[in-house]
Image (spheres, rainbow, N blue to C red):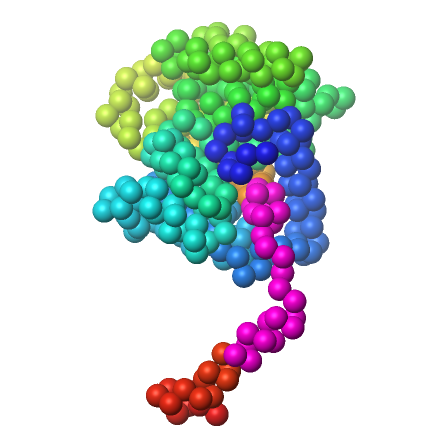
């Protein structure tokens, strides 16, 4: 099994299914206030080169619930490729922390972190993919399956731009033998290399399908889940006029388009630009599970941290060993001549 969680395509169907099962166990444990403190006294370095609400909060709260601690290393706060190489940062962080989560501008940065880290590295979004989001999304679909269907029977129609979320969804759904369609303007559709990987996934699974199309109205009629994402990200603001012209109005998920998918549920990784890629009527409708998805990020991060970190932890020290080391420190304090008086008993 790979040590790092950089791309869901690095994992077998059995491994991904096992992660999904672990999310279920931890969500159930949390519902009754019984999350085991498997990461007590452990630390997670949380690198963010970009802002985040869900990823930042879910990882930090996940560590707290598991008994550990998350350090939020915000944009510009640490030397990451500036004044220090990415590799050196990985070596230092992994000598003090038990795992690293990183949201990076360029996918190569998270790969480089993993190459030099001695502890697991979890990709919290790059310009290529968003694997923690995709695992969460498939878990959420599993909680909202259409009657009589399994995950492998489901059709996911992603409407919009070939974002990092689109990439991850295309890869994880085909890996699990599901059906995936990307509907959007031709110049924003998934590139051939993603489709080749998806075809290989489907061949290995022996089930599923993948397609791209501009015919969004036709595509959504077959959907069990209609998914969309932002039409532009922070580094694409110069392209807003041309992107808006390409997507609007045909690829906006509004009541007119969503009415063509009468049995589908609506999904969005959030943040959403209300009135742009999705309207309030759809995002806030009874058929929207976007906010369930957002909450499931917490249970997904709890499962990923447990899956990757716990098996690699050293055996817990015996109570005799703890007593021995505490006695050494107390003895030192008692005999240290130059300690302030209040520390010497
Ligand atoms: N979906 C997602 O990753 O949200 P944030 O950008 O708020 O982390």
- Judged from this view, the residue extending furthest toward the right is 148
Q: Nearer the viewer, residue 157 or 122?
A: 122
Q: Is residue 308 above or below residue 333?
A: above
**Residue 277 % position (x, y):** 42, 24
Q: Is residue 292 above or below residue 246?
A: below
Q: Write the residue at 55% across / 80% down.
A: 327
Displayed quadrant of residue 293: top right
**Residue 81 % position (x, y):** 28, 41
Classify residue 311 as left or right of residue 191: right
Q: Write the residue at 30% across / 50% down.
A: 78
Q: How many marks?
A: 0
Q: Nearer the viewer, residue 33 or 206?
A: 206
Q: Write the residue at 53% across / 15% down.
A: 198
Q: Could you tell me what secondary structure mostly forms the magenta stretch? A: helix
Q: Is 308 included in the stretch rendered in magenta?
A: yes
Q: Is residue 217 above or below residue 71?
A: above
Displayed quadrant of residue 39: bottom right
**Residue 134 % position (x, y):** 53, 30
The answer to whether residue 34 is seen in the rendering is yes
Q: Is 317 included in the stretch rendered in magenta?
A: yes
In the rendered structure, which segment of residues is drawn in magenta?
A: 303-328
Displayed quadrant of residue 218: top right
Q: Write the residue at 66% across / 54% down.
A: 35
**Residue 65 % position (x, y):** 58, 55
The answer to whether residue 224 is seen in the rendering is no
């Amino acid at each position: 099994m790979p040590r790092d969680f950089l791309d869901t395509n690095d994992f077998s169907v059995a491994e991904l299914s096992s992660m999904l099962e672990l999310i279920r166990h931890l969500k159930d444990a949390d519902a009754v206030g019984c999350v085991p403190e498997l990461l007590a006294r452990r630390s997670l370095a949380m690198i963010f080169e970009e802002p985040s609400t869900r990823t930042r909060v879910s990882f930090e709260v996940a560590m707290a619930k598991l008994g550990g601690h998350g350090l939020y290393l915000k944009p510009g706060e640490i030397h990451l490729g500036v004044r220090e190489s990415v590799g050196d940062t990985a070596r230092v962080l992994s000598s003090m922390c038990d795992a690293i989560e990183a949201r990076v501008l360029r996918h190569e940065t998270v790969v480089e972190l993993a190459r030099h880290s001695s502890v697991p590295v979890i990709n919290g979004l790059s310009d290529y993919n968003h694997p923690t989001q995709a695992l969460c999304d498939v878990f959420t679909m599993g909680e909202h399956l259409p009657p009589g269907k399994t995950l492998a029977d489901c059709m996911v129609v992603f409407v919009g731009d070939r974002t990092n979320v689109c990439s991850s969804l295309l890869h994880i759904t085909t890996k699990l033998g599901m059906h995936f369609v990307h509907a959007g303007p031709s110049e924003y559709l998934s590139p051939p290399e993603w489709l080749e990987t998806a075809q290989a996934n489907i061949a290995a699974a022996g089930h599923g399908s993948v397609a791209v199309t501009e015919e969004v109205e036709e595509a959504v009629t077959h959907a069990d889940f209609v998914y969309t994402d932002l039409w532009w990200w922070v580094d694409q603001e110069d392209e807003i006029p041309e992107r808006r012209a390409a997507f609007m109005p045909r690829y906006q998920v509004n009541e007119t388009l969503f009415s063509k998918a009468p049995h589908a549920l609506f999904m969005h990784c959030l943040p959403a630009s209300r009135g742009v890629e999705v309207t309030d009527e759809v995002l806030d409708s009874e058929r929207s599970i976007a906010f369930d998805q957002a909450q499931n990020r917490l249970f997904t991060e709890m499962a990923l941290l447990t899956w990757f970190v716990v098996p690699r932890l050293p055996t817990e020290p015996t109570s005799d060993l703890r007593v021995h080391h505490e006695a050494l420190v107390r003895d030192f304090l008692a005999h240290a001549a130059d300690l302030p008086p209040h520390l010497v008993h």
